[in-house]
Amino acid sequence: MKGSNTIGASLGPNLAKLYLEHNDVQEVRILPSNIENEYKISGLLQGREVYIDIAAHGSSTGFRALHSNNADIAMSSRPIKDKEVKKLAALGDMLDLHAEHVIAIDGIAVIVHPNNPLAQLSVQQIAKIFSGEIHNWNQLSSSYSGAINIYARDNNSGTWDTFKNLVLGKKIPLSESAKRFESNDLLSDTVAADPQGIGFVGLASVRQAKPLSVSDENTVALQPLHMTVATEDYPLARRLHLYTAPTGRNWAANDFLSFVHGQSGQEIVEQVGFVSQNPVAVDNLEDRQGPNEYLELTRSAKRLSLNFRFKPSSASLDNKARQDILRLSQFLQLAENRHMRLLLIGFGDEKQSQRRAHILSKLRASAVKSALRHQGISSLPVAGFGAFKPVATNSSSKRIKNRRVEVWLVSEDSHSETLSMAWR
C-alpha cells in the first residue's frame, strides 16, 4: 500500500494489523522503517512470515506506484484525477465500483492556537488568509492581533490537494511565506505551539490545536463533528479512498478491501479518529432549519449519519452511495431497527425555477428508494425540498454537494397521521 500520509500514518497500519489478526496471523507487529512514514506490518502464519508494506508519502505517489506495479493498493485522500485515470487505463476503469473504495470520511480542520479567540471563518476568509491577502489577526478579530503565520501540507499531500480544490481553487495561490509539512501531526503540533499560527490538517490530527467552525457562502458555519462530517455537510469534509486495479486484482487485496468495508474495519476507522461509514441514528436537533413541512416530517424522526450522493452530471448513485445501500440494509436487519421505517428526503442546487429544483430533488430521493427496493428494503413515500438547506455555495462547482438525499428513521407508529397528510 502506497500513497496518502493521512491514511498511511495510522489508519492504514491499524487496518492492516487487525486484518492479519482476523486471519489468524500470530505476533502481528507494526514495525517502523528507517525511512520516515514507511511501515511493515508483520506476523507469523503457520511459521511463515506474512506482511503488508506501507509507504505514506502523499496521494500522488500511490497512483504512480500503481502505474509502475510497485503497489497493490493506492491510498488517496482525494478522488483520482482525470489524468491519473487516463494514465492507469491499462489497469481498467479506475472509476469503477471495483476500483474506487471509499473507506472513511475525514474533515479538513482549519486549526489555530488554543488561545486564539476566533471561533469561525468562511471558506472565502480562509482563502484570503492562506493567500496572504489577510495577513494580520486584527483584520478578523478586534481582540487579537499580530502577523499570521501560515502552515500547509506539501505538494504530494492529498490533504493539500483537497484544500486547494475546496478553498483556493485554480486562481488563488498559496502565500510564499507558508511553511510546508509532509506530516499532518507535525503541522498540528507546530500550530498548537504558535499563538500566531493557522494551518489545516485531517480530522484525526487536530491534537492540541483548536479547530474552527467553517461556513461556505450563504450557509451555516459548522464544526468538524461526527455528524456534520459523516453526512459530508461540513464544507471541508472529504472522502478517504483506496484504489486498486479493477481487473486482475490479487485475492489478498480483494480480501483486505472486503474487511475494510465491513463492520470491524469501520470500527478501526472510528478508533483511529476518522469518521466511519457504519450508520448511526442521531436524535433530532431542536434548532434544525428548513421549510415547515420538512420540520414537521422530521419532528419525531432520527437522522442517520449518511447522505446519498450522485455521480457528477448523473442521476446514478456514486460508488460510496452504492456501498451505503448495502450498509443500510445490514443496519435495518438489527433487532432494534426492525420496527423502523426509512424516510428519504431529497435536496438539490438552484435551478431556473423552484419547481424544477423541487422535482429533481424528489427524483433523487426516488432513485435511492429504487436502489433500496432492489435490496428488499421498503421506505415511506419520498419527499423533496429543492434548493432549501444548501451545504455549499450554489455559485461554483461545489454546488454538486447540495444534490443529496437525507435518510431519517421513523418508528412505525410515529405521527403517521402527519406523514399521510404530507404526501396526500
Image (cartoon, rainbow, N blue to C red):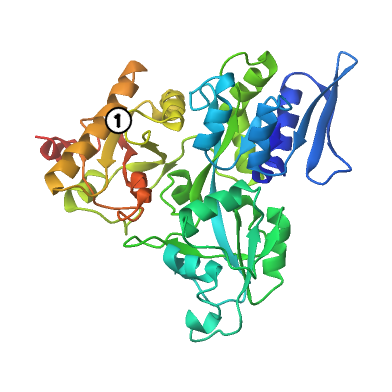
Q: Image check: 85 left or right of 344?
A: right
Residue 301 in the image: above or below residue 178 = above
| Residue that appears at 76% across and 25% down | 21
Residue 314 pos. (x, y %):
32, 32
- Pick the quarter of the image with the C terminus: top left
Direction left: furthest residue: 424
90, 106: nearer the viewer: 90
Residue 13 quadrant: top right
Front one among 45 and 139: 139
Answer left or right for 242 relative to 181.
left
Image position, residue 47 (x, y; %): 90, 15
Q: Nearer the viewer, residue 387 or 68?
A: 68
Residue pictured at 48% horizontal, 70% vertical:
128
**Quarter holding residue 363:** top left
Helix, strand or loop at mark 1: loop
Q: Can residue 379 be seen from the camera position used here?
A: no
Give the crowd class for mark 1: few <14, some 14-19, many >=20 residues within 10 Å.
some
Q: How many labels, in total?
A: 1
Q: Is residue 279 visible in the rendered structure shown here?
A: yes
Q: Residue at x 69, y 17 (%)?
A: 252
Amino acid type at mark 1: Ala
Name the quadrant of the N terminus: top right
> Which residue matches tag 1?
315
Q: Is residue 165 above or below residue 152?
A: above
Q: Position of residue 342 (x, y in %)?
A: 31, 32
User: What residue is at 53 percent from the left and 54 percent from the top?
Assistant: 163
Name the quadrant containing residue 69.
top right
Residue 140, given in percent of the width and then of the height, sits at 48, 79
Locate residue 35 relative to residue 244 in the image: left or right. Answer: right
